[in-house]
Image (tube, rainbow, N blue to C red):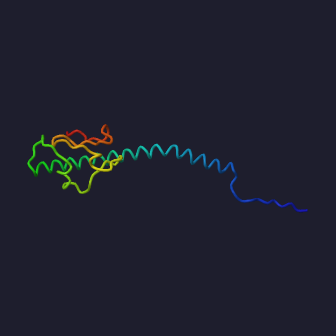
């Protein structure tokens, strides 16, 4: 009498559990880095928006001969900006993203004002 060794193809439960554990370990390592990279990218995009807004303010003040104490609004500088600029950290409009005061003061981010700010002029 011959005995047949029948072997079914597939993965055992232990093998599947090891693969799931490795994927979970890699995810716990990678997710914080992705979050940090996203917040850094949002901060850099917001700072670049602030630079564009400041450039538009300075150009508007130069063309209209305004001094540093003159008040500025978005309506004044909107023609100097290509698109409506919003903060990438959750802004929906210019008014809820940035604050404009005078020509001499830099624009401010309303979403994350402690981190999203223009660097001091040298």
User: Which x, y percent locates residue 19?
Assistant: 61, 50
User: Which x, y percent locates residue 42?
Assistant: 35, 47
On-image quarter of the N terminus: bottom right
User: Which x, y percent locates residue 12?
Assistant: 70, 52
- Residue at the location (33% across, 40% down)? 112
Identify the residue at the far top of this view: 114
Quarter-of-image position of residue 8:
bottom right
Identify the residue at the far left of this view: 65
Identify the residue at the far right of this view: 1
Task: Say which of 122 and 110 sits in front.
Answer: 110
Task: Say which of 103 and 33 sits in front.
Answer: 103
- Residue at the location (25% across, 46% down)? 50
Locate residue 60 relative to residue 110 in the image: left or right: left
Locate residue 78 relative to residue 93 in the image: left or right: left
- Residue at the location (56% across, 44% down)? 25
User: Which x, y percent locates residue 90?
Assistant: 35, 47
On-image quarter of the C terminus: top left
Q: How many marks?
A: 0
- Residue at the location (23% across, 50% down)? 52
């Amino acid at each position: 009498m011959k005995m047949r060794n029948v072997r079914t193809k597939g993965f055992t439960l232990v093998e599947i559990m090891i693969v799931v554990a490795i994927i979970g370990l890699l995810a716990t390592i990678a997710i914080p880095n992705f979050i940090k990279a996203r917040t850094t990218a949002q901060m850099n995009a917001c700072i670049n928006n602030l630079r564009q807004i400041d450039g538009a303010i300075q150009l508007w003040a130069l063309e209209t001969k305004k001094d540093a104490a003159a008040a500025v609004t978005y309506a004044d500088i909107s023609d100097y900006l290509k698109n409506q600029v919003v903060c990438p950290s959750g802004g929906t409009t210019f008014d809820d993203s940035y604050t404009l005061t005078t020509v001499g003061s830099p624009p401010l981010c309303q979403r994350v004002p402690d981190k999203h700010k223009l660097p001091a002029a040298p």
